[in-house]
Image (tube, rainbow, N blue to C red):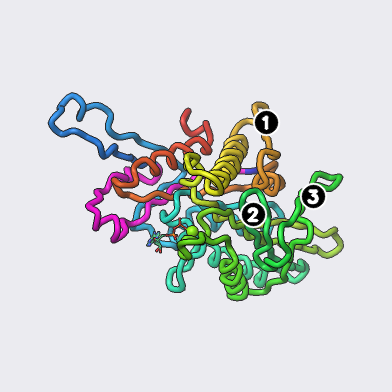
Amino acid sequence: SGSSQVALRIRPMSSAELAEGARHIAHCVDQQVMVLQDPMEDSNDVLRASRSRQKSYLFDVVFDSTATQETVYHATTQSLVAVVTSGCNATVFTYGPTGCGKTYTMLGTDGELGICARALAELFQTIEDSSSDVEYEVSLSYLEIYNEMIRDLLSPSLGCLQLREDASGHVQVVGLTKVPATNANEVMQLLARGNRQRMQEPTAANCTSSRSHAMLQVTVRQRHQGRELRYSCLCMIDLAGSERAAQTQNRGQRMKEGAHINRSLLALGNCIKALSQQASSKYINYRDSKLTRLLKDSLRGNSHTVMIAHISPASTAFEESRSTLAYAQRAKSIRATVE
Ligand code: ADP
Ligand code: MG
C-alpha cells in the first residue's frame, strides 16, 4: 500500500541574515519535533513572556542545519528507489520559500550532491545489480509549470504543452520529450541544461526557479521474462517558492503568478493530506491544478510521496517560516496529531 512522509529541513543561517542581526528562532527538539519562537517577545513583560511565545511542530523527521545531504537522502528518499524498481510510483517534493534550500536539497552542489543525483545513482546501481531475467529501461522528461502552462525544459522551443487524459484515466503531456538514460551523470547534465531554461525573473537572473514548479520524471520500464511490460515513475519536484503564494497584494503579472502558485500548492497539500487519511474519508480533487492533474497517478493508490519542507532559522524570516510550517503540518497525516 501507499505512504506519505513530510520532513522538515532547517538550513544554516546565511551571511546576509547574520549581517542584519538575525537570531536563531527555529530549533529541533528531537528527531521529529521542532519549535519556532515568535521573535516579538517582550522581556519586560513577565506575563507575556511566559505565555506561549513558541509553537512546536511534529514531522516524520526534522533536520537542523548540521544535517548532511547524505543524512537527508537516507531518511527521506532512499527507500523510494526500491519502490520504483518494484514497479510502484514515488514522488518527492521540495517545498518552502525562495532561498530556504529547496534546490540545495534537490540538486545540491558539485561537492554536496542532492537527493536527485543520489537517487539516480542508486537506481542505476540497483538495475545493474538486478538479475538478468529482468530488463530495465530508464527514460526521463523534465518540465516546468509556470502560470498553469507546461513547458518542456528539454525542448523549450515546443512552447506550451497540453495535458490529455486517456480513456483509462492516465494523464499525459502531449508531445513531451522523453530521453533514454543509462547513468546518473548523464541525467545531471541534462538537468543542468534544463535548469538554464527555467522561467527567469526579468530583473534578477539568480532568481530562476522561484516562480515555477520544475518536475523531473524518471520512468522505469521493466520487462520480466514471459510477463507484460510494467511502468513506474520516480518523480522529483522542485516547487515554486511558497512565498509567492502569499503575495496576492502584488499587481499585474506578479499577482497572477501568486494566484496560480497558491492554487497548485493548496491543491497539492490537499492531495497529500488525503493520501494519509483513511480511504473512507478521502475525496481528492486532482482537477484543481495542472500540478495535481499531472501527479494524479503518482498521488493515489499505492504510491509513495515524500515532501521536504524548508525554512530559514532566522528571526527575520519568522512569518514565512510560520506559514511554511503550517502548510507542511497540514499536509502531514492527521494520524500524527492523534498518536
Ligand atoms: P531555494 O531553492 O529554496 O530558493 P537554494 O537551495 O537556492 O534555495 O538555497 C539558497 C542558498 O542557501 C544557496 O546558496 C544554497 O547553497 C544555500 N543553502 C541552502 N541550504 C543549505 C544547507 N543545508 N547547507 C548549506 N547551504 C545551504
Ligand atoms: Mg531553488
**Mark 2 or mark 1: whose residue is earlier in sequence:** 2
At label 3, which amino acid type do we have? Arg
The correct choice, above or below, for 32 with respect to 130 in the image is above
Q: Which residues are magenta?
A: 3-32
- The spot of residue 25 in percent (x, y) is 28, 44
Tell me which corner region of the image, top left, top right, bottom left or bottom right, holds residue 228: bottom right
Q: Quadrant of residue 138?
A: bottom right
Magenta-drawn stretch contains 248: no
Report the residue marked by disc 1. 283
Image quadrant where one finds the N terminus:
top right
Image position of 199 (left or right of 7): right
Magenta-colored stretch includes residue 23: yes
Question: What is the residue that sits farthest to the front in this orientation?
Answer: 252
Residue at 38% x, 57% y is: 67
Tell me the crowding category of disc 2: few under 14, some 14 to 19, or many 20 or more residues within 10 angstroms, Cα based. some
* Callout 1 crowding tier (Cα within 10 Å): few <14, some 14–19, many ≥20: few
